[in-house]
Amino acid sequence: MFTGIVEELGIVRDLRLLPNSGRLTLQGKKVLEGTQLGDSIAVNGVCLTVIHQSGEEFTVDVMAETLAKTNLGDLKSGSRVNLERALQLQTRLGGHLVSGHVDGVGSIRKITPWGIAQLLEITAPSTLLSFILPKGSIAIDGISLTVVDVEHDCFSVSLIPHTSQETTLGIKKIGSSINLETDLIGKYVARFMGFNRVRDSKEDLTMTFLAENGFA
């Protein structure tokens, strides 16, 4: 579990793509403090397990499912990535609960200056947009951000200067792909309420059912 508060920008040192998997070696410093083999580190919002560590470099394996659902396969040697260690119980939750399990990939459609900030308009699959709401939370490449508005095929977020300077969003351009993870709690609520439920379910969960059983 993560908070979506990026700790540092890392650098891709090597990416080896195999037919159904990959292996990624990255350079980082702060995220390796206290890190041991088997620990989790979010790389552009993707929860990955450290399998090797040496000095200021660490290596992670990337499964086929991860390559298919994220933009990690687009990385190259020298690419900058957002890094965050897993949440500790005593850590301040400055962002929101982020699992590191990316739901899909979006694309930056428009970047507009907005006072001291930048407004990013991001296209996303319709299956994800149904879980995104104005003033709600979303993780973009592992960065916890607040949604400004939602349209039929896109949503927008605002970046303060600090976010632009300390994360990869500051160097992204129009057309850049980004990993999206919608709000964890919202997905569970939608599931319990019957949205995206497995079709062979015999009974949908309704507000009436919840009220009758003391849950609402």
Image (cartoon, rainbow, N blue to C red):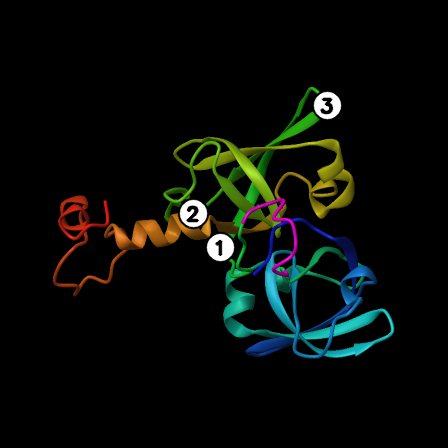
Image quarter of residue 14: bottom right
- Locate the C terminus by quadrant: top left
Q: Nearer the viewer, residue 129 or 97?
A: 97
Reading the image, the residue beneath label 1 is: 104
Structural crowding at the residue carrying mark 3, measured as other residues with C-alpha within 10 Å and reported as few (<14), some (14–19) or many (≥20): few
- What secondary structure is the magenta-colored segment mainly? loop
17 or 209, which lies in front?
209
Q: Which residue is mark 3?
A: 116
Distance (Cα) linking label 3 and label 2 = 29 Å
The boundaries of the magenta stretch are: 88-96
Identified at 64% across, 57% down, the residue is: 90
Question: Mark 3 to mark 1: distance in Å?
Answer: 29 Å
Q: Position of residue 114 (x, y in %)?
A: 66, 22
Q: Position of residue 190 (x, y in %)?
A: 31, 49
Under tag 3, what secondary structure? Answer: loop
Residue picked out by circle 2: 125
